[in-house]
Image (cartoon, rainbow, N blue to C red):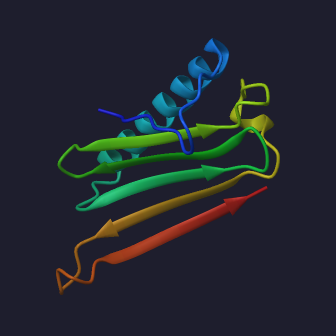
Amino acid sequence: MCNCATAGPPCSPTPAIRRARSACLGEACAAAALLTAHAKIDGRLSLQLRADAVLRLLFAECTASGSLRGIAQLDDDLDAPVDLRELERPMLAITVENAGLDPREPLRYQSLRSN
């Protein structure tokens, strides 16, 4: 189950912002779960998306055991994104973490993509 959280003091975002945040978070959680299952990850996979405006943070993480969590932070003062392809200077990071030979030192692989 995804947990939605916002940074800073409690606020009352508009219904459009709440819907956009829920939609973005749902899509990110679904993508993380699908990628984790498809790639047969033994540890965890996380997706993180940031942009210059509107979308401050979109994060989703899924583990091999099926735990799923996420967070979406949108700028309440701007119009909510309808399409993530319209974001200004987005940065996407996908991180895969698997158990290493030493359980205290997991193996991490990360891919970054910016536009």
Residue 8 falls in image quadrant: top right
Q: Nearer the viewer, residue 69 or 86?
A: 69
| Identity of the residue drawn at 17% across and 80% down | 103
Residue at left 25%, top 62%?
Answer: 43
**Furthest-bottom residue in this view:** 102
Residue 107 lies in quadrant: bottom left
The quarter of the displayed image where residue 13 is located:
top right
User: Where does the image place residue 76, in percent across and percent down from the top left?
Assistant: 70, 31
Q: Hey, which residue is sitting farthest front in the picture? A: 9
* Camera-nearest residue between 71 and 113: 71
From this view, report whether residue 96 is shown above or below residue 38: below
**19 w.r.t. 38: above or below:** above
Please provide percent x and percent y for residue 32: 41, 44
Q: Is residue 60 above or below residue 27?
A: below
Residue 77 located left or right of residue 72: right
On the rendered image, what quadrant is the C terminus found in?
A: bottom right
Percent coordinates x, y for residue 98 in the rendering: 28, 69
